[in-house]
Image: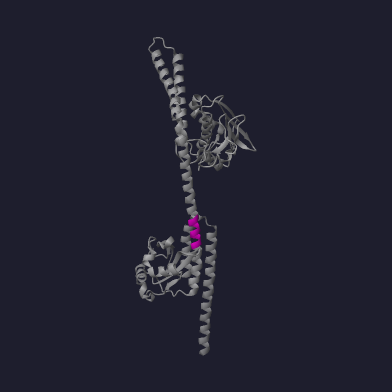
Amino acid sequence: MQLHAESASSRLARGRHRQTEQAAIEFERVLTRISTTFAGAPWHRVYQEVELALKDVLRSNAIDQACIVEVLAGNAGAYLRHVACVPGMPRVGEQLDYAAAFPWAYARTVGRGEAVAFARIEDAPPDARTDAATMRELGVRSLLHVPLRVDGRVRFVLTAGAKRRLLAWPLRTVNRLTALGEIFAHAIARAQAVAEQARAEQEIDELRTHQWHSARVAQTAPLVASLAHELCQPLAAILNNAQAGLRFLNHRDIDVDEIRDILADIVASNKRANEVLGALRAMLRRRGTTRTTFDIADAVGDVLALVRSELMTEQIDVDLSAAPEAYVHADKTQIEQVLLNLVMNSIDAMRALEGARRLNIAVSASDKTGIVVSVKDTGRGIPADRQPKVFEAFWTTKHKGLGVGLSLCRAIVESYGGRIWCEPNVPRGAAFRFSLPCTARAEDGVAM
């Protein structure tokens, strides 16, 4: 009889040992799978993977509910962020204020970094009445709170609850849940950091776009009078040709060829006015960066059309030489902004000077240097000791200048992998050059 009892006891002990071994193997399997998942998960999928992994935690630890609570910086509160529960169990709302619902546990997990376990609601001390009431409201019979540290601070709390049966929360279970929770905590913290960096970079891009747009508006403002004059010419031509056409129509013998020529002149004048307005509209429009492949000679032509009246008023001759098919992949409006800034600087440098005033714009292309654009003038020039500073922000040689134009030019050119520099022009004036990587001809635009 005694022998039979010992045999049964041994079988029971061996059964418990096998269960313990199986539970340990299952935990190692879950730990490995979850670790591997988060090691290779992109940051934007981390939150989805946390939800899936919490369900694994439920299955492997025989619990009914698992939650991740985020502790806000400065102990400004704590809120549920991720919840998983077995089918049939009410899901806890993710807007639940953890600090208000479990003040006693919050003080110990977040304030002291201690794990808190309730095997039964009745085990809650008198100071934890609010915690016990919340457990009853949620229908939880046993509850565990595990603090999770990131960079030495409790950033998250893992809560595990049981509704269908009581759990004693042995140390082995607490340690396993802590190990899993720390994987979640570091994965979520890393995803938050990457998301915050992405938001910061987006804000910087928006600020840069706003700054570049403001600079374009500032650069275009001085041209308003010239542009008004530039528009008056085609509009006056349209009016004169239309009046001439009306006079011809009053004659009994209508010369069809003459009428055709008049209409052709009206169309040409209208196109000229549209070109001026289109160039101005492109410079003033605020939009996101759109990269296209274009011949940089087209951008030079657009800018020269924009400043044509200014060049005529200041009696500046223009020499233009452009290599064929000098294609770059960039935002055309931004490259035109660079060209406009350099051309306007050259015009200002030659304003009111005696002698020949000449603006030379050249575009060259080679496999070694890429596309190089040079803008040379016969103006006052820049002293050698000041040339290294011309691209610094808020440094200017103009009495009314802000010192932002050339610094923005450098930012734009360098954003496309190019560079910009200046040097003396012989025998007089300054020469500004910038380079951009050359590209094969293409038609598609790419929004950035």
Query: How has the structure been colored for display?
Result: one colour
186 magenta-colored: yes
441, above or below 184, in the image: above
Q: Main secondary structure of the magenta part?
A: helix
Q: Up-down: is 417 above or below 108?
A: above
- Indicate whether residue 171 is drawn in magenta: no
Q: Nearer the viewer, residue 115 or 362?
A: 362
- In the image, 242: left or right of 386? left
Q: Nearer the viewer, residue 334 or 261?
A: 334
Q: Position of residue 85 (x, y in %)?
A: 42, 65
Q: Residue 388 appears in which quarter of the rendering?
A: top right
In percent of the image, x 52 and y 75: which residue is there? 20
**Residue 265 location in percent, x, y?**
46, 20
The residue at the point 47 percent across, 53 percent down is 196
- Asked if 46 appears above or below 236 in the picture, the reply is below
Is residue 311 visible to us here? yes
Q: Is residue 63 visible?
A: no
How many marks can you see? 0
Outermost bottom residue: 1
Q: Does 347 sit above or below residue 82?
A: above
Residue 419: quadrant of the picture? top right
Give the magenta-colored segment's residue range. 185-193
- Relative depth, front residue between 309 and 253: 309
Residue at the outermost right position: 368
Q: Give coordinates of residue 340: x percent, y percent.
A: 51, 33
Q: Quadrant of residue 168?
A: bottom left
Q: Position of residue 320 (x, y in %)?
A: 57, 27
